Amino acid sequence: MAFKIIETASALPANIVTNDDLTAIMETSNEWIESRTGILERRISETENTSDLCLRVAQTLLDKSGIAVSQINAIIVATMTPDYYTPSTAAIVQGRLGADQAFAFDISAACSGFTYALSAARGYVQTPDDYVLVIGGEVISKMLDWSDRSTAVLFGDGAAGVLLQGTTADQESWVSEKLITIGTESDQLVSGYAPVKRPNFGQVGQTQVGIDFFKMTGKAIYQFSTRRVPKAIEAAVLEAGLTLDQIDHFLVHQANSRLITKMASMLDQPLTKFPMNLQHYGNTSAASIPLLLAEQVETNQIKRGDVCVLCGFGGGLTIGIQIIRY
């Protein structure tokens, strides 16, 4: 089960919403948002849903690689903001892409989603004839309470992903992984709660599903991110037989610049190893890591052979770490 990443790609809504734009709809300021998060602007979808952005990523991956759609074996989409409860967003992408030789499914692990999806994808790349699309995509804006500045200012919409190909062990990208779920703290970050509000039996002509806005216990999530996540990264690197100094790039979930700075300090690594693009895109959840990866590859900051830690963390609570050699 060896794979290599042969292409990266991203897709973003055209609509840019700055911190100053947010002052028109809530009590906030550019200085308040930037000083606490590092975010200056984000992309907010006006018409595109999650499947639309993911489809753009999939098509770009095929166009850049020259791989025919008929060669794709599987499509995995990581998202916490799907178009529907069912069908899966991946199934919609598969149908619109015309990838009739591929099976498709979603993974819901919030901001760790892309790293969990990479873990699942390893099972479907057995030979050099196997190709898998792994995409993280979110339209979080449709789940936000725009009167709540504690959450609404943090997030943005987008999608990004990779095309994997099966390969021989001496050429593979994957080095090691560590996946963690802390379900006892699952109530710290929630979105889209669909309660049973009254008995469903006998109700005609209406559904019983009510969708709640995104909610987060900010202090608890910050403590989780700064205390548990660095320890998990250190343990994952050690278990891979590496040292932190041997890691070229730490591509961590783009949630908050202060958090990432603190993480670098706790790991005793230079901040230059922790690239950030959240100032332009905000927190894009499952799209965060592949969006950063695609950007770093596109600008030649990450080169073939570089060793990278991909670390997602968030709702679940979850931590997902993939160590790859790009």
Image (tube, rainbow, N blue to C red):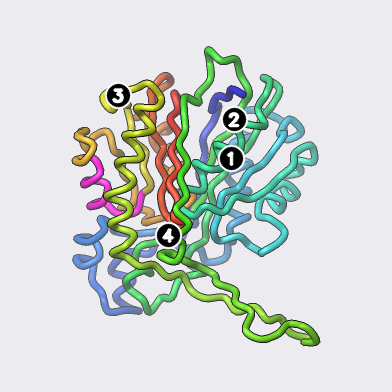
Q: Position of residue 99 (x, y in %)?
A: 75, 40
Mark 2: give few (<14), some (14-19) or many (20+) Cα within 10 Å.
many
Q: Residues within 10 Å of mark 4 (few under 14, many from 20)?
A: many
| Horizontal and vertical percent position of residue 114 | 51, 44
Measure how far apart labels 1 and 3 are at the Cα level.
28 Å
**In this orientation, which residue lies closer to the viewer: 255 or 23?**
255
For mark 3, what is the residue? Answer: 243
Main secondary structure found in the magenta portion: helix
Residue topped by disc 1: 134
Query: Mark 2 vs mark 3: which is more N-terminal?
Result: 2
Position of residue 59 in the picture relative to residue 98 (left or right): left
**Which of the marked residues, 4 or 2, is nearer the chain's N terminus?**
4
Mark 4 vs mark 2, foreground winner is 2
Q: Earlier in the sequence, mark 1 or mark 3?
A: 1
Residue denoted by label 4: 156
Q: For residue 167, what is the image quadrant?
A: top right
Disc 1 or disc 3, which is closer to the eye? 3
- Amino acid type, mark 1: Val
Q: Quote the CA–CA distance across marks 2 and 3.
A: 26 Å
